[in-house]
Image (cartoon, rainbow, N blue to C red):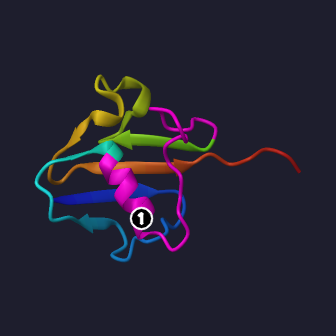
């Protein structure tokens, strides 16, 4: 399964630029984000610890430009070959 990744930062552990080629034929967005986290040299927590949600203060996640909040199955939304996952880090305010 090939999943394309767009981001506003360099995704740690993403060696092939914008493409992740996985052996699985079935994968949820949760499993995909966990796989990315495991590939990272320092673990990146996309999913809020102890919950079933993405931390909205740190991340905005989309599948094929559809925001996380609109997914019926939440983190159990299945990915399909060729899908694009957008991962946006939310910048911290201040100065």
Indicate the position of residue 44 as horizontal and vertical percent values.
53, 58
The image quarter in which residue 13 lies? bottom left
| Total tally of numbered discs in the picture | 1
Residue count near mark 1 (Cα–Cα under 10 Å), binned few <14, some 14–19, many ≥20: some
Decide: is 79 above or below 3.
above
Residue at the image position 40 percent from the left and 56 percent from the top:
6
For label 1, the residue is 38
Residue at the image position 14 percent from the left and 48 percent from the top:
26
Q: Is residue 20 magenta?
A: no
Highlighted magenta segment, given as a residue range: 31-57
Residue closer to the observer: 6 or 76:
76
Residue at the image position 41 percent from the left and 33 percent from the top:
67
Quadrant placement of the N terminus: bottom left
Residue closer to the observer: 57 or 35:
35
Q: Residue furthest front?
A: 50
- Please, what secondary structure does the residue beneath circle 1 have? helix
Indicate the position of residue 9 as horizontal and vertical percent values.
54, 62
């Amino acid at each position: 399964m090939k999943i394309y990744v767009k981001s506003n930062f360099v995704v740690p552990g993403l060696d092939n630029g914008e493409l992740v080629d996985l052996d699985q034929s079935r994968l949820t967005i949760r499993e995909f984000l966990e796989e990315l986290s495991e590939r990272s040299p320092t673990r990146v927590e996309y999913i809020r610890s102890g919950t079933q949600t993405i931390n909205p203060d740190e991340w905005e996640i989309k599948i094929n430009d559809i925001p996380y909040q609109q997914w019926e199955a939440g983190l159990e939304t299945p990915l399909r070959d060729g899908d694009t996952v957008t991962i946006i880090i939310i910048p911290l305010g201040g100065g």
